[in-house]
Structure formats: C-alpha cells, structure tokens
Image (cartoon, helix red, strand yellow):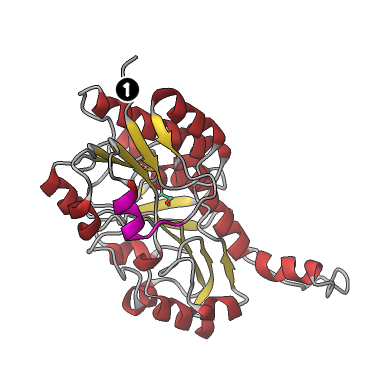
C-alpha cells in the first residue's frame, strides 16, 4: 500500500471535514483544539506534506522559513489570509490556498444580523429580559431604526459583499458600493457603484465593511471617514477588526454621530477594545461570520480539495500565493 500524504490540521474542525481528511490523508488532528505557538507549528510540521491552518495561526515569515522541506502546501480554513506571510511562502515555493465561495451566505447573514440587531437595539433588549429588568411593554421603550428601505453602503463588493447586497435587497434597501473595480451589470444587479469612497459614505445610512484586510484597508474607517457618514448611521463589520480605527469608532458611538454598530471582528481578538463592552449601542459577536455547519464543513472540504490537488501534482483551485 502506498503511503498517504501526511497533513497537520492545526485546529479542531468539523467532524465531516475531519472524516474527509482522514479518508484522503494521514491526518494529524487536534481534537483538544490546542492553540499552537510558532514554535509548536514548526515542530509539528516536521515530516508533514501539508498544513491545514486557520485564522489566528501565526504563519509568519519566521515560521515559514523554518518549515520542514517536506511541506508542499499551506491550506487555510478561511478566506482571510492576513495570518500568513504570502511573500515568505512564495519565497519557499509553498502554495497557499484559501476557501472562497463557500462562506458568503453565512458571513452575509451575519452582516444582516448585525445590521438588524444594532438598528433594533438587540443588545439592550436582550439584557433587559435576561437580567430580569423588564417592567412591561411601553409605547416608547427601546425605539430603534428600521432597516427596510434605507441606503446601504458596502465597502468591498467581492463574493461576500455581493451576498450582503442580495440579502439587503430582500429588505428593500437601496444598495450602494465601493470596490477597486466596478462589477459587471449582471453582478451589480442594480447596486450603485461609487468610484470615490467619500460619495459612498455620504449616502450610507448603513455601512457594511466587507473588504479584505490589506495595508490599504488597515484603519480604513477613521474619524475623517466617519465624519462623512450621515448622522446616526449604523456601521457593521464582518471583515477584520483592523479595518476600523477603534478609537474613532468608539468616539463617534459615544458622541451620537453614529447611531449604532454591529461588530463580529476586533483588533487583537479575542481581546476587543474594552470600551465596546460599555456601549449600549454596540452589538457584538465573537467572530462567528462563517460559523455555520454548512460553511465550516464546506471550508474543510475545500481545504481537502486543495491539499489533494497539490499532492496529485495539479494546480490547487483556490491558490492565493
Ligand atoms: C474567514 O474565512 O476569513 C473567516 O473570517 C474565518 O477566519
């Protein structure tokens, strides 16, 4: 019997995905879901043909430089790849793959949930009931803002941004977007393109951040840009925490310039800026955008496909480096 390729799976992933990996490969799983340090990763990668990593794993230049020569692919269980030094991987000739196209609906649902929960004061209402402080229905209790019919600005109209647009149209929202390039009319599907960010901000009653984290988008939503949003606008972030300047966002939520925010991602996760915890007009989630059975199984299967392609000498379908 020929030996099966050996892979290291750095996190506990879903049972169906692990079963697929075990069918195809000699997979070293992480059933206890230990978080591996850079040194752990280097040591554990010894003798492996491939690595299946995840957001938060420090696949930096030092780790990549020290990986065993046996490692022929790094497949990440994410669409974001800011935790991997792509240049270092290119320098070693190790392909890096992601999981596009299978988490768009899950992440877009989260963006819609954040919009609805932020606009309808879910944080305050939830706590009132859970903490047994609700004294009864009143005509003016916790009045929020309707999402229906409002203008939604989407920053980053990739697959996830497009899924947000589709769902938002179900709420009769007028969708506007800014993207590096304009979409085809078919993909645009009635959404309005803004070449300039400022003109998008000016019409965004709701603003959804759906761009990747890059040097260009780091700190994108700063005080200057927030000032250009309509007063009382609602900001939601399912992209990456660092796309937002936390101090600027917190100041605008405190001053009332912004009505509310819904945040699924934070700079320095799992620690979030503690000021968010003290703000009633912030609805927070712990980076659950793609956390559905459907998406996480499919993400694992995509990693398996990419690993298999490399081991069979084919170009992996979801290569980013
Ligand atoms: C992604 O795919 O990038 C999700 O945010 C999970 O990390």
Q: Position of residue 304 (x, y in %)?
A: 38, 30
**Furthest residue toward left:** 91
Q: Main secondary structure of the magenta part?
A: helix
Q: Position of residue 85 (x, y in %)?
A: 22, 55
Query: For the residue carrying disc 1, how many other residues have a C-alpha within 10 Å: few (<14), some (14-19), or many (20+)?
Result: few
**Residue 249: quarter of image:** bottom left
Can I make out residue 109 in this image? yes
Q: Is residue 134 left or right of residue 61?
A: right
Question: Which image quarter is the C terminus in?
Answer: top left
Query: Does 261 lie within the magenta span?
Result: no
Query: Does 42 lie within the magenta span?
Result: yes
Question: Which image quarter is the N terminus in?
Answer: top left
Q: Residue at x 21, y 27 (%)?
A: 315
**Residue 40: quarter of image:** bottom left
Q: Nearer the viewer, residue 293 or 152?
A: 293
Q: Residue at x 39, y 30 (%)?
A: 26
**Furthest residue toward top:** 1
Q: Position of residue 268 (x, y in %)?
A: 41, 70
Q: Is residue 255 left or right of residue 302?
A: right
Q: Is residue 249 left or right of residue 1?
A: right
Using the image, determine if residue 301 lies above or below residue 205. Answer: above
Q: Nearer the viewer, residue 190 or 313?
A: 313
Residue range highlighted in magenta: 35-43
Using the image, determine if residue 244 lies above or below residue 301. Answer: below
Using the image, determine if residue 120 lies above or below residue 316. Answer: below
**SS under mark 1:** loop
Q: Which residue is mark 1?
A: 3
Q: Position of residue 106 (x, y in %)?
A: 51, 43
Can I make out residue 121 in this image? no
**Furthest residue toward right:** 136
């Amino acid at each position: 019997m020929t030996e099966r390729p050996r892979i290291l799976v750095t996190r506990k992933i879903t049972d169906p995905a692990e079963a697929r990996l075990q069918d195809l490969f000699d997979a070293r799983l992480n059933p206890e879901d230990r978080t591996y340090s850079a040194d752990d990763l280097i040591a554990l990668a010894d003798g492996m043909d491939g690595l299946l990593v995840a957001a938060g794993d420090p696949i930096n230049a030092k780790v990549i430089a020290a990986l065993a020569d046996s490692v022929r692919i790094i497949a990440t269980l994410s669409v974001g790849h800011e935790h991997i030094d792509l240049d270092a991987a290119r320098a070693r000739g190790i392909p890096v793959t992601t999981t596009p196209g299978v988490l768009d609906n899950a992440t877009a649902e989260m963006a819609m949930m954040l919009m609805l929960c932020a606009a309808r004061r879910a944080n305050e209402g939830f706590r009132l009931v859970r903490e047994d402080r609700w004294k009864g229905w009143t005509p003016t209790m916790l009045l929020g803002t309707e999402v229906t019919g409002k203008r939604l600005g989407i920053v980053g109209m990739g697959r996830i941004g497009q899924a947000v647009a589709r769902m938002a149209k179900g709420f009769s929202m007028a969708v506007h977007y800014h993207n590096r390039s304009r979409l085809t009319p078919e993909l645009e599907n009635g959404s309005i393109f803004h070449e300039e960010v400022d003109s998008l901000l000016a019409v965004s009653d709701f603003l959804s951040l759906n761009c990747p984290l890059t040097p260009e988008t780091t700190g994108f939503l700063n005080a200057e840009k927030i000032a250009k949003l309509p007063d009382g606008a609602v900001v939601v972030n399912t992209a990456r925490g660092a796309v937002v300047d936390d101090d600027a966002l917190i100041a605008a939520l405190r001053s009332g310039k912004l009505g509310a925010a819904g945040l699924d991602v934070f700079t320095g996760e799992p620690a979030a800026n503690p000021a968010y915890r003290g703000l009633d007009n912030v609805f927070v989630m712990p980076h659950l955008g793609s956390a559905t059975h459907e998406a996480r199984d499919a993400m694992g299967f995509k990693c398996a496909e990419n690993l298999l392609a490399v081991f069979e000498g084919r170009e992996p379908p979801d290569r980013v480096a």
